[in-house]
Image (cartoon, rainbow, N blue to C red):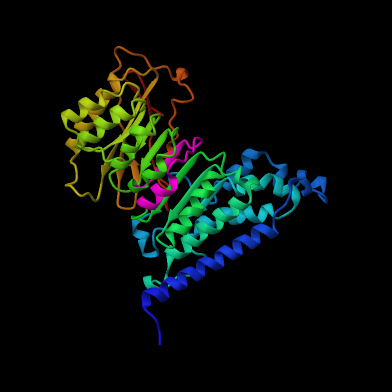
Amino acid sequence: MTGHPAKEKAKRSCKALQVAVNAAVELAWDSKLKPDEWGASENPTNTRKGLLSMPPEIVFEVLSHLSPVTNATMVVPLRDLWGPTLEKAYLERPDTLRALSQTCVAYRRRILPLVWGQLDACVSTREEVDVDRSEWKWFQHVGLALFRKCTWLIHHPEHGIFVRDIHVSISRFQVDIILSAFIKCLRSLPNLRSIHILHAYTAIGPPLRRLTDGLSFPSVQTFIGPNYCCGLMKCCGDVRIVECNREDGAKLVSAMRRNCRQVEVVRGINLEGEVPLVKQLTRFAPNIRSLQVGVRLSNNFISHLKEFKNITAMEIQVPQDYSVYPLPTEEEVKDTENSIREVLCCSEATGDRRLQISYRTRRGVKLYKPIPELDSDDSEYDSDALSEHAVWDMRDMLFELDTPLKHVEYVSQGKDVHVY
């Protein structure tokens, strides 16, 4: 006689998690290595062979072609058949680095910081998956992967010092246990600089707020995540870059009021006619220098944008093939462009001004539209006067695509726009 289906399912989930716990603890216990034991039988000549004989720039360039997960990587909606996970091509880089780190002691010394430079738990399984959703338990796979890696880092603080970036998906699988391990892992990472949550269980808010109450992660400079992960963002008091990748971002804006007053770059917030949100931003994040907005902006909305005294860069995001509202016309885009130009010219910040128009499709592609040059009767453009901060690293803005993305970058100084 079988029991209740829900209870049987819960037992199977607990059993899978317990197996992962035992395996992680045993692995952590058996593989601890003291730094002074490394290199006991090392061949000194290995430090000048193979990859180690090449300049670091070349090595990094080679590794950059192995599909790294970055802060710009997103889950493409059309791939939801496999769940909100990335394709297994993103496993090439960690697999390669792990193999190199196990070549010899000399390689391990150099490659190990790259292996643990970022914590990724957002990729699909290595095995072939049946198209039937019931056969593909992506939430269990992602949950166990996150738990194993967090447990490893908790038991290996000598590896945790290397972690600077986190890219994870938090599923509903045993969310209380796995989320607790994740938060404990975050507390053990002294050099963490960015947290990127590609996907999170929609009911994660209450347990996340409970587990992060009173915690602080002062080293985090970038937070990218859904609106309902505001509890984690509140712990990042010195965060500079905030991006919402799901819902309108109103809760993230509220988190800036009490906890995050140093925000300088805001993306993904629904700033299209939402006057209350932009009013809150002007009060809670007065240091904003880069902002992403929509197309349909009222005059009242524009007037509030002019209150940002330090703003130097703005992006107008235009939906190209889908929207909850009617798609904007070219005239509307042009009017918004002219209004944003006025906002940038009214800014009291010194240095360059940057404006871009991006067209977003259902697959997340961004195409950058050429912006005609402005009249520069009262200002001169000096290309030699550009500071290193004038060039916006567009790689942080672009989404990962299957095909190369064509884009144009613009830098302006004063009222002049320069194309390069």
Q: Is residue 268 left or right of residue 240?
A: left
As drawn, 283 above or below 330: above
Asked if residue 250 can be seen in this view, the reply is yes
Q: Is residue 385 left or right of residue 46?
A: left
Residue at the limit of the structure toward the top, as seen here: 378
| Nearer to me, 343 or 166 | 166
Question: Residue 292's quadrant in the figure?
Answer: top left
On the rendered image, what quadrant is the N terminus found in? bottom left
Q: Is residue 207 magenta?
A: yes
Residue pictured at 74% horizontal, 46% vertical: 35
Picture coordinates of residue 220, whole percent (x, y):
48, 37
Q: Is residue 5 magenta?
A: no
User: What segment is highlighted magenta in the picture?
Assistant: 205-226
| Nearer to me, 246 or 413 | 246
As drawn, 392 above or below 34: above
As drawn, 217 above or below 303: below
Residue at the limit of the structure toward the bottom, as seen here: 1
Residue pictured at 61% horizontal, 49% vertical: 115
Picture coordinates of residue 406, whole percent (x, y):
39, 42
Picture coordinates of residue 247, whole percent (x, y):
29, 47
On the rendered image, what quadrant is the C terminus found in? top left
| Nearer to me, 52 or 104 | 104
Residue pictured at 34% horizontal, 29% vertical: 285
Q: Is residue 230 left or right of residue 28?
A: left
The total of numbered circles placed on residues is 0
Asked if residue 75 can be seen in this view, the reply is no
